[in-house]
Image (spheres, helix red, strand yellow):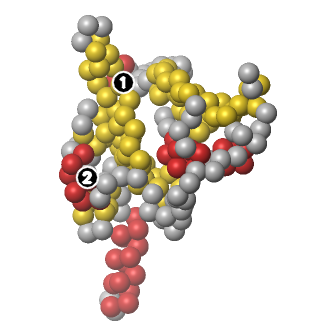
């Protein structure tokens, strides 16, 4: 077999090989699931945006379980990464589409709201909302048999924005940190 054919076979096999699940590459480092937040920060640098939510509380004890979302925005040529930490360990790494340039001053309008896809993008482009509602909803069971371990509550947030150039306030609905709906609400 010639060197060229051997190289082509290696290229095909590399493309067909299963990727490492949940791994994040930061330069020459590879961060796997179950990594500690400090390990991720040491290898990838500080995140661009961090938000933490309680996922379970017990009356009298308080919060007993948390979920933290870290966002890394490498700019418009690469994908934004969202890292989900559950109880202090890396549980999931997601790609959320192309990154963007962050301006020094947030300037928000209807078009900006309609094009934002994540909680991080909303805060980076429009600033913090006037008010937030946060709740956990249990998804409706599907027809297939599910176990209790397979049913995970979904974080649903409603963010209220009052845009100065509009007579209506805007209510942005986020599900697991992703924008899913925007509706207008009369101002006062």
Residue at left 40%, top 52%?
A: 48
Quadrant (top left, top right, bottom left, bottom right) of the C terminus: top right
Sequence-wise, the earlier of marks 1 and 2 is 2
Residue 152 left/right relative to 179:
left
| x and y, in percent, of residue 97 in the image | 53, 55
- Residue farthest along the top direction in this orientation: 60
Quadrant (top left, top right, bottom left, bottom right) of the N terminus: bottom left
Q: Is residue 150 visible?
A: no
- Of residues 117 and 18, the one nearer the viewer is 117
| Quarter of the image where one finds residue 166 | top right
- Of residues 33 and 82, the one nearer the viewer is 82
Residue at left 36%, top 19%?
A: 148
Q: Is residue 170 visible?
A: yes
- Of residues 130 and 182, the one nearer the viewer is 130
Q: CA distance from mark 1 to mark 2?
A: 22 Å
| x and y, in percent, of residue 145 in the image | 45, 21
| x and y, in percent, of residue 178 in the image | 54, 40
Rendered view: 26 above or below 56:
below
Q: Which residue is mark 2?
A: 40
Rendered view: 32 above or below 15:
above
Q: Mark 1 near mark 2, Cβ–Cβ under 8 Å? A: no
Residue 32 left/right relative to 11:
left
Quick one: label 2, few (<14), some, or many (20+) residues within 10 Å?
Answer: many
Q: Secondary structure at mark 1?
A: strand
| x and y, in percent, of residue 128 in the image | 53, 39
- Residue farthest along the bottom direction in this orientation: 2
Residue at left 49%, top 64%?
A: 75
Rendered view: 70 above or below 24:
above
Rendered view: 145 above or below 7:
above
Q: Which residue is mark 1?
A: 55
């Amino acid at each position: 077999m010639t060197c060229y054919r051997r190289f082509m076979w290696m290229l095909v096999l590399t493309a067909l090989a299963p990727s490492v699940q949940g791994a994040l590459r930061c330069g020459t480092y590879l961060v796997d699931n179950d990594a500690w937040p400090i390990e991720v920060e040491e290898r990838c640098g500080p995140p661009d945006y961090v938000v933490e939510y309680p996922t379970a509380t017990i009356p009298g004890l308080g919060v007993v379980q948390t979920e933290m979302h870290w966002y890394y925005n490498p700019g418009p040529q690469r994908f934004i990464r969202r890292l989900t930490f559950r109880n202090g360990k890396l549980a999931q790494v997601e790609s959320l589409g192309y990154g963007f340039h962050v301006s020094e001053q947030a300037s928000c309008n209807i078009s900006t709201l309609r094009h934002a896809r994540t909680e991080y993008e909303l805060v980076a482009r429009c600033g913090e909302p006037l008010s937030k509602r946060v709740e956990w909803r249990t998804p409706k069971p599907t027809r297939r048999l599910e176990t209790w371990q397979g049913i995970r509550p979904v974080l649903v947030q409603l963010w209220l924005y009052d845009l100065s150039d509009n007579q209506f306030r805007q209510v942005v609905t986020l599900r697991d940190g992703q924008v899913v709906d925007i509706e207008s609400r009369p101002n006062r």
